[in-house]
């Protein structure tokens, strides 16, 4: 059996503008890009915007990000305060950020994990 946890963090992100290779369109709460930490490993997460309804290319803002961490992941250590990360879609870098603090870590028993 594998243990799973959800790590909820607050972060400050900066999205690249279109001229820098960023998105052409804004995104809203629920956006699920790929996050790359230490240029060595990445994970998926879901962004909730805290200070606006949508984020345009080139803007900065405060967000909450929810990460699912599986113990079978080769990098099972959860993100921590002051970790830097890149925001990607596919192999394209769209932004960057820093984790300000960990809000919550929720442990799940294997039978509680629901897969879609």
Image: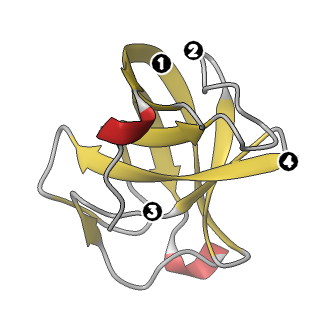
Q: Earlier in the sequence, mark 4 or mark 3?
A: 4
Tell me if 18 is positioned left or right of 36 in this view: left
Query: Residue pushed farthest bottom?
Result: 24
Disc 4 vs disc 3: which is toward the camera?
4
Depicted 103 relative to depicted 39: above or below: above
Q: Earlier in the sequence, mark 4 or mark 1?
A: 4
Instruction: Name the secondary structure under disc 4.
Output: loop
Cα–Cα gap, marks 4 and 2: 17 Å
Residue that label 4 marks? 39
Badge number at residue 100 = 1
Q: Earlier in the sequence, mark 3 or mark 2?
A: 3
Cα–Cα gap, marks 4 and 1: 19 Å
Depicted 84 relative to depicted 46: above or below: above
Callouts 1 and 2 close, C-beta under 8 Å: yes
Q: Position of residue 23 (x, y in %)?
A: 48, 78
Observer able to see residue 62: no
Callouts 4 and 3 close, C-beta under 8 Å: no
Q: Residue at x 82, y 38 (%)?
A: 38
Q: Position of residue 19 (x, y in %)?
A: 59, 80
Looking at the rendered image, the quarter that the N terminus falls into is top right
Residue that label 2 marks? 81
């Amino acid at each position: 059996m594998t243990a799973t946890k959800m790590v909820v963090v607050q972060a400050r992100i900066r999205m690249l503008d279109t001229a820098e290779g960023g998105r052409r369109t804004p995104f809203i709460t629920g956006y699920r890009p790929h996050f790359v930490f230490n240029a060595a490993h990445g994970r998926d997460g879901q962004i909730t915007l805290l200070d606006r309804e949508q984020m345009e290319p080139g803007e900065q803002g405060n967000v909450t990000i929810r990460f699912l961490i599986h113990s079978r992941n080769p990098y099972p250590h959860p993100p921590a305060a002051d970790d830097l990360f890149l925001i990607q879609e596919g192999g394209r870098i769209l932004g960057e950020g820093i984790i300000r603090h960990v809000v919550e870590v929720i442990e799940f028993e294997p039978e509680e994990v629901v897969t879609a």
